[in-house]
Image: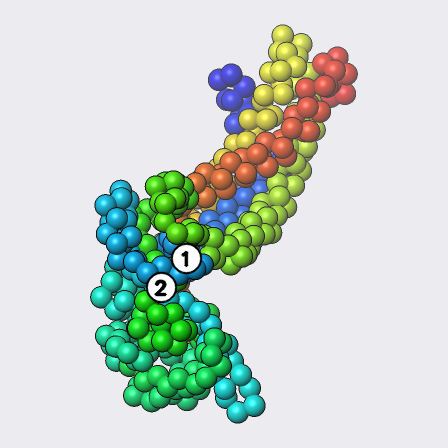
Amino acid sequence: MLCELWLSQRYLRTGKKEKIISATALISMIGIAIGVLVLIVVIAVMTGFDKYLEGKMMGTNSHLILRFPNGQKEPYKIIDKLRREPHILGASPFVAGQAFMKIGPQIISLDLRGIDPKLQPQVSSLREYIKQGSLELEGNDVVLGEELALRLGLRLGDKISLISPVTLTKTDFLIKGLFNSGMYLYDSTLIMTSIKGSQDFFKLPDLVTGIAIKVDDIYRVDAIKEDLYWKNKDITPCEILTWVDSNKNFLNALKLEKIVMFIVVIMTTVVAAFGIVSTMIMSVMSRIKDIGILRSVGAKTRNILEIFIFQGLSIGVTGIILGLIGGIALSLSLNNVIDFISRLIGRSLIPKDIYYFDRIPVNINVNDILLIVGCVLLISLAASIYPAFYASRINPAEAVRHE
């Protein structure tokens, strides 16, 4: 094994006749390195955006929801029971439903949610998102998203009229606060009011439609959901939803986008792998005499195969190492690079008033790195197999006679 490895490296070194082989090997290494670098940066940014969006989704909503189709009269008794369960950090009742607003000839649909202002901060980051006013809601006070306020030309202290789908009558609400969660979907459609105000609006006397729950590990919500289901079967009919269930389509779209981007970018590595194939073929053709001599002195087919597979893998591994170093370094300094370019062009590449953030979220995940390394290693191995197999099938007598 060590002998084959030494010979494989020896055949890559520059000699008078092998300069072109060494040059193509170097180009192949650079191609592999660039492919790995781009993969690491792209996947790190996409993973960072996934984490960022997950945080925004759970900043406005909770990790788990107990939904009561027929309503629940004693939510605080259930909340006291839930707080004694392991992994549950907080719980808060709510009333949720649709409301309508008439703007000229148009009628728009909005999500109206009644919350407990004292308990809501235990299950979401809504208080942190308040940009104007406060979350201290009483009666028909409301907080709404800045996008919705901008769309309708509303300000703090204005009154809005909402139409109940139950009674089809108008109810006036006073704008007590404006929030900005960074998610357009919520900022443009969500209105929060007090539980009492929503109960009167939907004609639900002393009833809530659900309980929001915060857990200690967002990635164990399915197990916690299963445990809660069996422990709370005696509660009036209820449905338990996780944050994944509530955002399934959106999360699936993010996952599909990440997979597609991975496949598209890894194609650059596949193209670079053709350089390994050409390097290997030239190396085999220039070493026919050496192969014949090795076979004549007792080298087996397997030994020849290993020599040239190691040669191809060494090109791939070197490219992977260079790509790893460059990719991780660029990912960690990506925002510094963007700041530098912004200073050069005299304007920000990421305007905060448009994107709600001024830094690109980057998350370098070990599992992503291992997946990238594994895939590129397999591509390098696949590129080495045919030339190595061809070299191993060369007849020693014909090889010597050929030379």
Secondary structure type for disc 1: strand
Q: Residue at x 26, y 57 (%)?
A: 76
* Count of number-bearing discs: 2
Query: Mark 1 belongs to which amino acid?
Result: Phe
Position in image of residue 343 (x %, y %): 37, 74
Q: Residue at x 49, y 81 (%)?
A: 168
Position in image of residue 89 (x %, y %): 25, 51
| The label number, if any, that marks residue 68 in the structure image | 1
Secondary structure type for disc 2: strand
Q: In the picture shown, does residue 156 fall above or below 72?
A: below
Around disc 2, counting alpha carbons within 10 Å, would you say few (fewer than 14), some (14 to 19), or many (20 or more)? many
Foreground pick, 177 / 346: 177
Q: Assess whether mark 1 and mark 2 are in contact (beta carbons under 8 angstroms).
A: yes
Foreground pick, 103 / 366: 103
Q: Residue at x 53, y 57 (%)?
A: 249
Question: In the picture, which quadrant includes the C terminus?
Answer: top right
Position in image of residue 67 (x %, y %): 41, 57
